[in-house]
Image (tube, coloured by chain):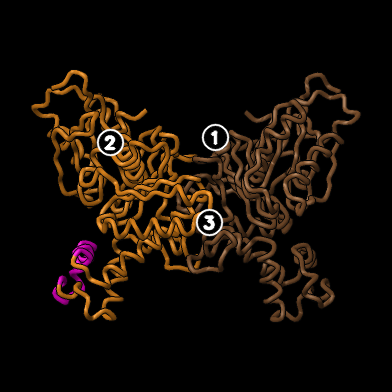
Chain colours: A orange, B brown
């Protein structure tokens, strides 16, 4: 145990898993647990899972913990510590998660939207370290985002800024779950992507994807597309290039709006790696206003698997 | 002459006119001049016009002038006072306008992008007074913008933030002068609008616009469309509703990105007034993320005709 180092607990609250870890100020995970989210149990059950997770990492722990950071989906009021209507966590409404956890563990608790937590995590521990300002994009079930401007999270009026997934790139596009049309999430969000490829695949009879799914479209996942991509499949390449184009169109608009030239891409679909990032970067560079063009940089996120826990713990270290 | 009141010179440098005025700290114009921009004469000629204008408002002036503010098109470095490639002002390249004017008049000079100056003007003198944060949109030849966040101009990395006109609302849309496609400017910018209506008008034989242009499409201007609108012309109403929809789509994306709910619309096409603003507001409210919906407000700019001069003078009073 180093005397100088500080430690925090990071809680990554997701619709699929609740992950809890002790993280050092340098971003090293000391101990972690992960359980499947009992989302159907509503907030009571899920909050109990969070508490059990915290208790578990705290057992036999002799490090001094400076605080607990929680990254949560939904609309989060960082001031009040409330979480509102998190998608994929039914029955929550508005819950004062910060207060509940603080009362239980008698320690400082910070709650932040998960995408914002990821942005802070990348700023402190990851690819954002050398950058004053950047836009973080998290690709997964949805498309999340967070804006770092002059080393601070840009929160907007009520902490909901950075909803990159709901930039519309086609005014007449497909309906999005949010109620709008043509949101970039309807192109890159996992379920939309899978549905689209399921529909298109019949036109690509020679694609390696068919073998990988054993000719059963129900087996299709983003990881299958990724595998096909790594095997050099032409159609998979086409998909990924197209996804990059769609995301690039949205990020060019974001760049013009914010005059920020650095973009960090993380999350599952970010696993498409270099081919995706290259396509995003080419598209932004081609579409953004001229003075911004030479500054465009699209970088992969560094935190990878433990991004959620690290990002959440970073909330404690972040002023 | 009130002892307490401060005065500044505001310079509104435009492709069409150079306007110069003395403005009080309360936003009252004491004296002003306006000349047609000799844009073809390049920067030397135009800067001479600015200097002559300043000299003219200063003649027989006994007010103490605290500084000169200049609102300029193009990319402006507020730190250096440089203006780069202003559209509609050929041959400029990069000019250190701030330094040149300061040297001549031995007084503090502030240079800012014209749309940002308009935003600061509305914040200090206009519709933005009661708002902590808002997005200013200026409709004219192009579509400009400025972001006010917590009573400060959001500049981005190099002062070019707020380029609302170059939010793309259709990834496959019409080519924009900027090189991108489907920018909202290609829907609302004056020349695009006029061209579009010239093409469509043949399908609207009974529109009052025909009389107003004396059946000659070359006479078509946004003001003609405005007049037809005021006369209750059905097609003009349709155009304006559609413009509002297009702008609303872009601003919904901006709202989701920034979590800012107040939008102030100014400039020429803003003369379409309430019908335009209503359509913009309806569209944003329908498309923005749910928690933001109830906060959406679309307001007309207050500064009107002298917006440029007042906005520029506000740069002197703005810290």
Classify mark 3: residues with Cα within 10 Å, few (<14), some (14-19) or many (20+): many
Residue A122 % position (x, y): 31, 40
Pointer 1: what residue? B150
Image quarter of the N terminus of chain A: top left
The chain carrying label 1 is B
Pointer 3: what residue? B167
Is B51 displayed left or right of A160 in the figure? right
Taking the magenta stretch, the answer to whether it contains residue A222 is yes
Pointer 2: what residue? A125
Query: Closest to the observer: A290 or B294?
Result: A290
Q: Report the span colored magenta.
A: A212-230
Is B230 displayed left or right of A10 in the figure? right
In the image, which is nearer the foreground, mark 2 or mark 1? 2
**Outermost residue to the left:** A60
The residue tagged with tag 2: helix, strand or loop?
Answer: helix
Q: Is residue B12 above or below residue B6?
A: below
In the image, which is nearer the foreground, mark 3 or mark 1? 3
Q: Quadrant of residue B78?
A: top right
Classify mark 1: residues with Cα within 10 Å, few (<14), some (14-19) or many (20+): few
Give me the residue at 19% from left, 34% from top: A28
Alpha-carbon distance for marks 2 and 1?
Answer: 28 Å
Image quarter of the C terminus of chain A: top left
Taking the magenta stretch, the answer to whether it contains residue B122 is no
The residue tagged with tag 1: helix, strand or loop?
Answer: loop
């Amino acid at each position: 145990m180093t005397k100088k180092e500080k430690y925090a607990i990071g809680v990554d609250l997701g619709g699929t898993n609740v992950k809890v870890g002790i993280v050092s100020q340098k971003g090293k995970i000391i101990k972690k647990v992960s359980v499947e989210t009992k989302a159907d149990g509503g907030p009571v059950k899920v909050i109990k899972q969070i508490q059990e997770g915290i208790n578990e990492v705290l057992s036999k722990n002799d490090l001094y913990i400076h605080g607990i950071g929680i990254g949560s989906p939904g609309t989060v009021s960082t001031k009040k510590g409330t979480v509102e209507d998190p998608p994929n966590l039914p029955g929550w409404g508005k819950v004062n998660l910060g207060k509940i956890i603080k009362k239980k563990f008698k320690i400082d608790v910070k709650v932040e939207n998960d995408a914002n937590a990821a942005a802070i995590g990348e700023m402190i521990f990851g690819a954002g370290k050398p950058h004053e300002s950047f836009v973080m994009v998290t690709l997964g079930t949805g498309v999340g985002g967070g804006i770092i401007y002059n080393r601070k999270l840009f929160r907007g009026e009520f902490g909901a800024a950075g909803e990159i997934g709901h930039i519309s790139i086609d005014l007449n596009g497909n309906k999005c779950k949010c109620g709008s049309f043509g949101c970039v999430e309807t192109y890159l969000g996992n379920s939309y992507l899978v549905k689209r490829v399921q529909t298109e695949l019949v036109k690509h009879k020679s694609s390696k994807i068919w073998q990988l799914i054993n000719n059963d479209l129900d087996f299709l996942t983003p990881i299958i597309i990724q595998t096909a991509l790594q095997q050099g499949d032409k159609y998979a390449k086409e998909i990924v290039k197209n996804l990059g184009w769609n995301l690039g169109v949205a990020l060019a608009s974001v760049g013009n709006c914010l005059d920020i030239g650095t973009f960090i891409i993380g999350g599952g679909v970010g696993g498409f790696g270099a081919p995706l990032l290259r396509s995003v970067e080419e598209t932004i560079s081609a579409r953004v206003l001229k003075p911004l063009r030479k500054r465009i940089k699209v970088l992969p996120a560094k935190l990878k698997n433990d991004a959620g826990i690290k990002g959440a713990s970073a909330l404690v270290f972040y002023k």
